Amino acid sequence: MNQLKCTTSNCRHNLKQRCNASIIGISEKGMCDSKIKRAGGTLEQTFAELEAADDMLQDAPETVRCDADCLYNSDNKCCASSILVSDTVFRTKCKTRVEHK
């Protein structure tokens, strides 16, 4: 995994668009199973990002578990060189997902 960019606005694992979850999981429908809302919501996220030093940020895990029907799914692991995860109206989804035709 070269890059995982997460633009969700209310997740405990997201810090400056980097995911620091030890395990990242994508469901069958392409939803991010790893998302955990912050107790203070988006305001808490904003403060956390202001306080975070860039050298303290973790790189994304090497493996992203994926259960979705996707061209990048290889034995339930994502093989895409980069992944974008972002908010939709109701859920946080993998925007890199490409369904089989």
Image (spheres, rainbow, N blue to C red):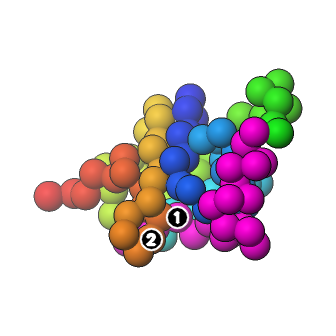
Q: Is residue 91 visible?
A: yes
Packing grade of label 1 (10 A; few <14, some 14-19, many >=20) is: many
Q: Which residues are magenta?
A: 29-50
Determine the secondary structure under disc 1.
loop
State how many labels appear: 2
Q: Residue 56, position in %: x, y?
A: 85, 32
Mark positioned earlier in the residue sequence (1 or 2): 1
Magenta segment includes 48:
yes
Q: Residue 9, position in %: x, y?
A: 56, 56
Q: Does the CB distance between marks 1 and 2 fall below 8 Å?
A: yes
Q: Amino acid at mark 1?
A: Cys
Rendered image: mark on residue 32: 1
Packing grade of label 2 (10 A; few <14, some 14-19, many >=20) is: some
**Which residue is label 2 attached to?**
91
> In what quadrant of the picture does the N terminus appear?
top right
Q: Is residue 60 visible?
A: no
- For the point 68% across and 59% down, the residue is 43
- For the point 22% across and 57% down, the residue is 100
**Image depth: mark 1 or mark 2 in front:** 2
Q: Residue furthest left?
A: 101
Q: Residue 36, position in %: x, y?
A: 68, 69
Q: Residue 51, position in %: x, y?
A: 82, 39
Residue 92 located left or right of residue 48: left
Report how far apart the C-alphas of labels 1 and 2 lie in the structure: 8 Å
Residue sitting nearer the eye, 38 or 77? 38
